[in-house]
Amino acid sequence: QVQLVESGGGLVQAGGSLRLSCSASGSIFSINTMAWYRQGPGKQRELVAVINRGGSTNYADSVKGRFTISRDNAETTVYLQMNSLKPEDTGVYYCWSVVGPTWGQGTQVTVSS
């Protein structure tokens, strides 16, 4: 069973940066697809970025060129580097694993204008 714990959220001004981390338990993490989702106020949860077992990535159009998803060498943590943040990026960000599938508890990101 996989467990996911996110961290790194907070309050930032527009144009600023944050890096989210998702620590995963379970040895099968390294061979499976991981993703970040977000849910803004009054909005449905949406896919932000995904990284597959081969390291290939894909992004929502709204974050392309600003966000980068990556995983560390030991492949126990997945990151979301968020640059040039906008107020519309505000929401709860969730880590997701294809195993289960499994969701983390979420971390709040608030971008002020």
Image (spheres, helix red, strand yellow):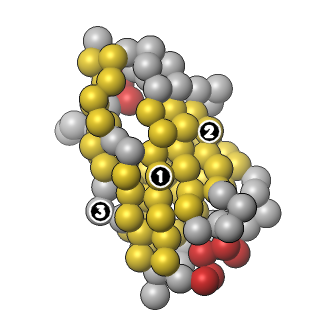
- The C terminus is located in which quarter? top left
In the displayed structure image, the side of residue 41 where residue 45 appears, left or right: right
> Are circles 3 and 2 on residues that touch, CB within 8 Å?
no
Q: Does residue 45 show up?
A: no
The residue tagged with tag 3: helix, strand or loop? Answer: loop
Q: Secondary structure at mark 1?
A: strand
Label 3 crowding class (10 Å Cα cut-off): few <14, some 14-19, many 20+? some
Q: Amino acid at mark 3?
A: Gln
Left or right of 52 in this view: 21: left
Whether residue 67 is visible to the viewer of this picture, yes or no, is yes
Q: Which residue is mark 2?
A: 68
User: Secondary structure under badge 2?
Assistant: strand
Residue 89: where, in percent of width, then height? 38, 30
Determine which quarter of the picture holds residue 105: bottom left
Please give the name of the residue rendered at 27% of the width and 18% of the height, measured from the top-left corner: 112
Across and down, in percent, residue 63 comes to 54, 31
Q: Which residue is mark 3?
A: 105
Q: Amino acid at mark 1?
A: Ser
Sort mark 1 into few (<14), some (14-19) or many (20+) by Cα contacts within 10 Å.
Answer: many
Question: Which of 15 and 98 lies nearest the eye of the viewer?
Answer: 15
- Residue to which mark 1 is pinned: 21
Nearer to us: label 2 or label 1: 1
Q: Earlier in the sequence, mark 3 or mark 2?
A: 2
Residue 80 place in picture, x, y as percent: 53, 44
